[in-house]
Amino acid sequence: MGQFPLTLSRFITQSQATHPGGTGEFSSLLAQIGLVGKLIAQDLRRAGLISILGTTGEINVQGEPVKKLDEIANEIFLKVFRHGGLVCALASEEMEKPVLLPENWPQAKYLLLFDPLDGSSNTDCNMPLGAIFSVVMAPRKDRMPTEDDLVRKGTEQVAAGYLLYGSSTMLVYTVGQGAHGFTLEPEIGEYLLSHEQLHIPARGKVYGVNEGNYHKWATGTKKYVDYLKFQDKATGRPYSGRYSGCLVADVHRILLGGGLYLYPGEMDRPDGKLRLLYEANPLAWVVEQAGGRASTGTMRILDVEAKNLHQRVPLIIGSANDVRDAEKFIQGICEP
């Protein structure tokens, strides 16, 4: 009989043993994110049976219709971390303003930013969904955090990752020592280590992008996507198009098999659609820790200066060489 896979809690404990100054709080925080994943996965399994599909009739801060499951997932994050005592402020893609938790301060060291349900347009058709999280440290001990304290550059993250709800539920995270994936075993209610030290190939054969927006793209982006479709055995082209409408699912595919995902700037939206703090920064750090690359097309995502909670940014993310090629086309350096 083979060795039983490490559970999430055991893996974190063993990793923490290499840091003698660790207090265990960080391990508990990641365990709470795992709990969020279990609770949301439970609701998703029953979504079609308990009238939680569809929209609420409200519009979120991003100007998008609020799906019922968006609201439920957001509330699950808030409930778990409000009572966990480890976080003193939370910001969500679904909320205009952050939630401050003075009852957890000054003991709580962490601030949490999250997208509670990525790909919610997939909820009504039983396709993959996800959640994305980013953790930063509270910058000061002499006062409660403010909204400005949550607006931080990606290089200041101390943990980041995502939950993926597909044929199985997965938790993938990094704390700056590689990226690791865990799969929920529903029979025992534990996340088991399934992907230790993820490594994305330097080049892949898959690209993900919403080609329905082709007419809105800048010339360089159009040329690059056209280039991916031309046959050239020397460079492994053509690439296969794979796009699910769920950022987490598409990036997860790329993380495991290589290639790249694009949500570029558009003529009427040059800053892109994806949110820097809730989506681009955490996914960029995970992919970089697996040996990949994440870019706006002109600069590294993690070096983008954060200016406000709901800032948008173009995103090209995936295999390092593929992302570099895309940057050359976008910057007008390369022609097909």
Image: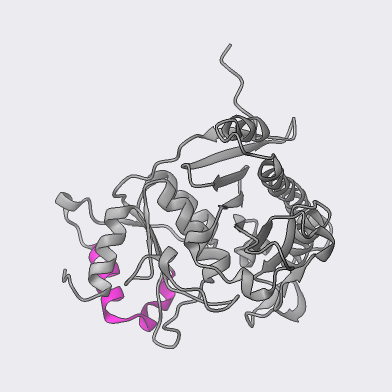
Can residue 254 be spotted in the picture? no
Q: Residue at x 30, y 68 (%)?
A: 225
Residue extending farthest front = 142
Q: Give the range drawn in magenta.
A: 210-229
Relative placement, left or right, of 203 versus 157 is left
Q: Is residue 313 above or below residue 237?
A: below
Q: Residue at x 23, y 55 (%)?
A: 237
Foreground pick, 282 / 272: 282
User: How was the colour assigned to the protein in this rendering?
Assistant: one colour
Res 94 quadrant in image: bottom right
Report x, y in % for residue 202.
29, 47
Picture layout, residue 20 above or below residue 5: below
- Percent position (x, y) of residue 293? 36, 56
Examine the structure image and report whether residue 218 is included in the region drawn in magenta.
yes
Q: Which sits in the foreground, 265 or 158?
A: 158
Indicate the position of residue 196 as horizontal and vertical percent values.
49, 34
**Viewer-proximal residue among 223 and 113:** 113
- Apparent side of residue 127 relative to residue 43 in the rendered image (left or right): left
The rendered magenta stretch, by its main secondary structure, is classed as helix
Q: Position of residue 22 (x, y in %)?
A: 64, 39
Residue 124 occupies quadrant = bottom right
Q: Is residue 93 above or below residue 40?
A: below
Residue at the limit of the structure toward the bottom, as seen here: 268
Q: Quadrant of the C terminus?
A: bottom left
Q: In which quarter of the image is residue 3?
A: top right
Question: Can residue 191 be found in the magenta stretch?
Answer: no
Q: Is residue 333 visible?
A: yes
Q: Nearer the viewer, residue 29 or 245?
A: 29
State how many labels appear: 0
Q: Residue furthest top?
A: 1
In the displayed structure image, the side of residue 224 where residue 118 appears, left or right = right
* Quarter of the picture holding the N terminus: top right
